[in-house]
Amino acid sequence: DKLLKLIGRSFVKLNARIGQWENGATLGDLLESFLTDKEIIAEYCLYMKGLDEALTLYNHLYKENPAFRTFMEDCVDEKTNWLFLPSFLQLPQYRLPQYKEWLARMYRATSPSHADYPLLERSISALERLMSSLSDVAKQAALKRKCKKVRDAFSLPQNDQCTLVHEGMLQHLSTDETQPSVFVYLYLFSDTLLWTLPDEEPETAQALDLGTVMANFPLQFLSVQPLPDTETVQHAFRFVVAKESPVLPGGTFDVTAGRAKDKTVWITLLSQGKANV
């Protein structure tokens, strides 16, 4: 509600300028002011943090609560332009690409000699920075929610400071030639590495449907080493567990990634995670 009021306040100023238009008047100063307003940027960040959670809650209630579903459907009419609540919740998000397109059209139609030309150029840059920042905010909020969901799914203690850094399927190489290698699904948190054994085939397995926990290693006791490629094994690396670890002390585990890029990502993020603990 506050975000929409702030946006509305800026458009009141814009409409007033247009209504009193004179030769040589500009719009770029108002647009740049709007796109760099610290209060608007802060509210947009709060909005993006809560949007996905709000939509998830709406979808849950709409599916599970008949009274809520009936009320929401009764609210949809000509006054709402036949739009459901989620469409209104997403309006501030959808407006940003529209702003960008509108500004780009104005910029292309403006002479470089006009006073608005550099102002529009700065406005477009400010909008791109805002969209990039909000995208990062949305990604971090989604990772935070997923972190909680994963830890709940595997009955792990919650930690408000914990984030889900990376996840993916790897192949665990057996040290016993008589035993086949198995696929494992790993969740890298900011404090631990959760090692799970999938219940399903790797082609169909999805996160949160992946069976049971094999181990949960504190990152401060875990290091990782790249392994050279061979004719039979590629993109392999080794987990080394410190002897002081409360989980499988002194153990080593070799795994392979699907691509060289995946191997690099895992090694980099694990090393960074250990350094940050």
Image (cartoon, grey):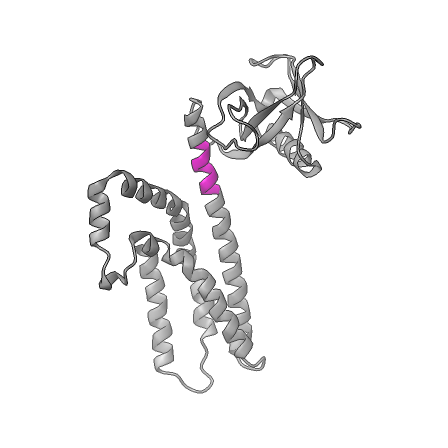
13 up-or-down from 249: above or below: below
Q: Is residue 36 visible?
A: no
Task: Report x, y in % for residue 250.
Answer: 65, 12
Q: Residue at x 49, y 44 (%)?
A: 139
| Most frequent secondary structure within the magenta stretch | helix
On the picture, is 204 further left or further right than 271? left
Span shown in magenta: 140-148
Q: Residue furthest bottom?
A: 23
Q: Residue at x 48, y 38 (%)?
A: 143
Q: Does the magenta stretch include residue 75?
A: no
9 up-or-down from 225: above or below: below
Task: Report x, y in % for residue 245.
Answer: 59, 14
On the picture, is 20 further left or further right than 151? left
Foreground residue among 246 and 260 = 260
Q: Can residue 56 be seen in this view?
A: yes
Foreground residue among 81 and 270 = 81
206 up-or-down from 183: above or below: below
Foreground residue among 120 and 56 = 56
Q: Residue at x 53, y 24 (%)?
A: 198
> In which quadrant is the C terminus drawn?
top right
> In which quadrant is the N terminus drawn?
bottom left
Q: Residue at x 80, y 28 (%)?
A: 231
